[in-house]
Amino acid sequence: MQRMAQHDALHDLVEAQTAWYRTYWQLAESGPTASTARSRRRLQELSVHIAGHPYWCGPSGTPAARIELKELARRAVGR
């Protein structure tokens, strides 16, 4: 049961980090006249969700795990 909960947490984090990268790159590539308020709010919401996720409080929530999360999400986005 613990393993399944950990898998769900990791899946949730990878999805959130992937959405974070997509939103970030969309924001970075937007033109100077683009309305960016919605994307900036979404980026903040995702940042709070990722940083405050309960997974990081457990024994698996190491700095190396955070780096691995980012690498997994970058590969998922294709950058």
Image: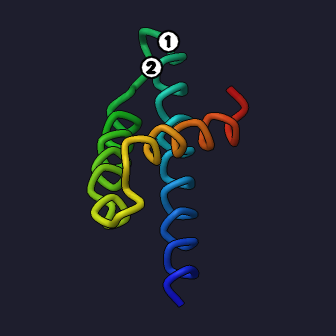
Which numbered tag is attached to residue 4? Answer: none
State which quarter of the image contains the N terminus: bottom right
**15 displayed left or right of 50:** right
Q: Is residue 68 above or below residue 37?
A: below
Q: Which residue is located at x 62 percent, y 43 percent?
A: 72
Q: Which residue is located at x 55 percent, y 53 percent?
A: 14
Q: How is the image coloured?
A: rainbow
Viewer-nearest residue: 19 or 4: 4
Residue that numbered label 1 is attached to: 31
Q: Which residue is located at x 37 percent, y 42 percent?
A: 63
Viewer-nearest residue: 34 or 50: 50
Viewer-nearest residue: 32 or 49: 49
Q: CA distance from mark 2 to mark 1?
A: 5 Å
Residue that numbered label 2 is attached to: 34
Q: Are marks 2 and 1 in contact (CB under 8 Å)?
A: yes
The kind of residue on which mark 1 rests is Gly
Per the image, label 2 sits on a secondary structure element best described as loop
Q: Residue 20 in the image: x percent, y percent?
A: 47, 41
